Image (cartoon, rainbow, N blue to C red):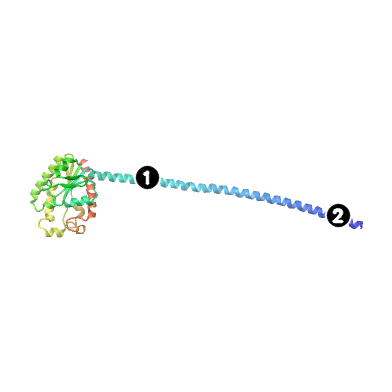
Amino acid sequence: MKKTFAVFLTLLLLICIFSACTAQHRIEEEKASSNNTILHTEDKTATETPTEKSTQTLQKPTIQSTENSTVKTEKQTSKKAESNTVSKSDSEISRKNALFIGDSRTIGLMEYSGLSADFFANTGMSVYNIYDKKVSVPNAGKFLFNELLSKKKYNTIYLMLGINELGYDINKTVSEYKKLVSYIKKEQPEAVIFIQKNLHVTKVKSDSEKYINNGRLNTLNAKIAEIADGKTVFCLDANILFDDANGALDASKTSDHVHLYAKYYSEWGKWITKESKKILEEANS
């Protein structure tokens, strides 16, 4: 009986010792696992840091690219502004303090060309009646010709008359033309004068008319061109813009064989601006 009890106590003691060892081993494993987890987390955090730096590095070229784009845009804007400035400078040569004198086709220039100038023009105006009637000058008032010239000084004066005079003797008309140019020079001594040759009419119109035809227009144009002295009086011929192969007004550019469609007056106005600049530069060189 005593022997059995001793064996029982021995087994119980061994079980307690085994349990204690197992528990200790389990605690050590948990500590080791915890340490591994901490180490793994720190390694992951360390790995993420270069990723953030990499992202910042990628963003910088983007910002730089935007800045370069902005600089490029500003340069383009600057170039565009310079281009506009040149264009404006070109146009001011013929537009600033300019006066256009003429008949119904000059009225077309006034209404559709976009030229910023004064216009002394009416339907039926000629070298014979230019002094007689008061004409409404947009943004200025209603004036006789001599009143307008005494009221304001012009840098450039454009003159195109002749188609309404074709029923008269051409030599007489040319004589009156010369008197008109002399009068303008007297009243506006500082102005440069551009005599514009009369635009042609269509072939159909020319072939059917006794007086208003391109033969008489060409004769008159040639004679008034001789008034130009190449110093203060010059001659412009816009027929090169609107003539067909026959040397007549292109029928596709007019509805009545005489007057241009509205859109072509803008082309004419731009050509006047460009050609005036060219002529003046050549004269001053």
Q: Residue at x 34, y 45 (%)?
A: 79
Is residue 32 in view? yes
* 59 relative to 98 in the view: left or right: right
Describe the element under mark 2 as helix, strand or loop.
helix
Q: Are marks 1 and 2 in contact (CB under 8 Å)?
A: no
The one of 154 and 61 positioned closer to us in this rendering: 154
The quadrant the C terminus occupies is top left
* 42 relative to 81 in the view: left or right: right
The quadrant the N terminus occupies is bottom right
The one of 271 and 149 positioned closer to us in this rendering: 149
Q: How far apart in space, not on screen, are marks 1 and 2 (Cα)?
A: 99 Å
Q: Residue at x 15, y 60 (%)?
A: 204
The amino acid type of the residue labelled 2 equals Thr
* 77 relative to 8 in the view: left or right: left
Circle on res. 10: 2
Is residue 230 in view? no
Q: Residue at x 13, y 44 (%)?
A: 181
Circle on res. 255: none
Task: Choose the circle earlier in sequence order: 1 or 2.
Answer: 2
Q: Residue at x 20, y 43 (%)?
A: 156
Q: Tell me the crowding category of disc 2: few under 14, some 14 to 19, or many 20 or more residues within 10 angstroms, Cα based.
A: few
Residue on which disc 1 sits: 75
Percent across and percent down for residue 104 are: 17, 52
Percent across and percent down for residue 147 are: 15, 42
Quadrant hosting residue 229: top left
The amino acid type of the residue labelled 1 equals Lys
Mark 1 vs mark 2: in front: 2
Describe the element under mark 1 as helix, strand or loop.
helix
Percent across and percent down for residue 232 are: 17, 41
Percent across and percent down for residue 221 are: 13, 50
